[in-house]
Amino acid sequence: MSESSENTGAQRPEGAGSPERPAAPRQPAGASGGSGLRKEAARAAELDAAGPLTATRDRFVLDEDTVYLDGNSLGALPRSVPGRIADVITREWGELRIRSWTESGWWTAPERVGDRIAPIVGAAPGRVVVGDSTSVNIFKAVVGGIRMAGKGCTEILVDATTFPTDGYIARSAARMAGLAVRPVEPARIADEVTERTALALVNHVDYRTGELNDLPGITAALHSAGALAVWDLCHSAGALPVGLDAHGVDLAVGCTYKYLNGGPGSPAYLYIRESLQERFESPLPGWNSHADPFGMDPGYTPAGGILRGRVGTPDILSLLALEAALEIWDGVSIEEVRTKSLALTDFFLECVNEYAPPGRVRSVTPYEHRRRGSQVSLESVGAGEVMEELIRRGVVGDFRRPDVLRFGFTPLYTTFADAERAAWVLGEVLREQADRDTAADAGTATAAVPPAEGPVAGGDGG
């Protein structure tokens, strides 16, 4: 969630090996009809034909032989990116060189790209700045929040189910400030916050289970106790409405390489509520956030507004790749994305229930829409091996230890046909796994029975 290293796990790169398809799809247990066609395939085709976001798939580079359900770790490549980066390299860098800081708009890119992200997360212009990694921005947000907290605060709360990096950084920041850290389940934060709490760092969507936490309710509860709300949006931005301004969120951080499709290691962003910007004191005061960056004054004077969230020289190649990637949002509303996300994940869960043998998988992602992000996580025996086999057959998800299969649904390019095919292949893999387990159990039982005396009826004696 916080770093691109989240992509680790039992997973091969997309396209590795030779993806296999079941040679002749057979009717799975529980499926109806005698034609040999999969029950839900026709329904998927109807849903795709009627869907408002079906055409946006053409804005991405995708392999039609692969079902890509790992956009919650790394989004697919938008077609707008390669040409833009080629121009940045050959013309802006190759010909204009240093002039591009002004003539090509490099210097203003962090806040300009931030303004492209702002409507996706429900923020007005001037409240989001892009740059640095998610981890660095979490550090800025947590320390900056502690410095704005009221006197007498002795602790910060941390989402007990958080992606580990968030917890590491929160603990480090708290040590520096002399505060305690108290892990709390998100659903318990409203009951656990006190007047001694400086802030709470919470994940909007749980990276492992896909559960959506109550951002409006938790934020309001924190404010009622005088604490600040700091949200990690890595698994929600670009997948569902966030409403940062509407819900009074104080600080927020998110990555851009998942549902925003900015590319591997693309820069993260920092949101600072407008009324807090002049009070925000960054723990990393760099020359890029100085009021007069080229004055080279040894004393630091922060710039006004969201610019004080900058630190050092921005990563221009990645930043401009992200800017090009965000063009795919032209004409797309986040509400449309949410509607399709819920429909896709509903349909996938129905297909898994239809195709998978009973008892082999269990959803740890909530079924209730208000509690679901845009991924489905399934507990499975031997999940690592199951995911390896899915990837070998052309269905790319990922695996989280010890037993969770994760499938991320990116509504801008994931189709209902993708969801149906993924569920079918998963059912095939799980049925084969069940058959092997049954055979192994039978072999064990046979070995445990003492051999009969004399020839076995019907046997050949061998």
Image (cartoon, grey):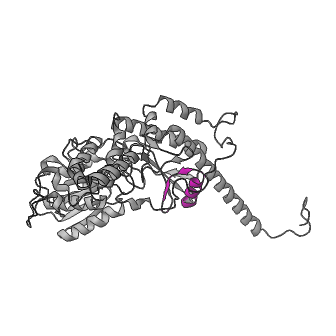
Q: Which stretch is magenta?
A: 383-402
Q: Is residue 370 left or right of residue 429?
A: left
Q: Is residue 395 above or below residue 177?
A: above
Q: Position of residue 458 (x, y in %)?
A: 91, 58
- Can residue 58 be seen by looking at this rendering? yes
Q: Is residue 49 above or below residue 150?
A: above
Q: Position of residue 267 (x, y in %)?
A: 31, 55
Total labels: the figure holds: 0
Where does the C terminus fall, quadrant-wise?
bottom right
The residue furthest front is 95
- Residue at 53%, 30% in the rendered image: 46
Q: Is residue 376 left or right of residue 39?
A: left
| Quadrant of the rendered image containing residue 335 | top left
Q: Position of residue 417 (x, y in %)?
A: 54, 38
Q: Is residue 402 left or right of residue 132?
A: right
Would residue 12 be counted in the magenta stretch? no
- Can residue 128 be seen by looking at this rendering? no
| Quadrant of the rendered image containing residue 23 | top right
Observer-nearest of 38 and 76: 76
Q: Position of residue 268 (x, y in %)?
A: 30, 54
Observer-nearest of 381 and 410: 410
- Residue at 24%, 49% in the rendered image: 109
Where does the N terminus fall, quadrant-wise?
bottom left
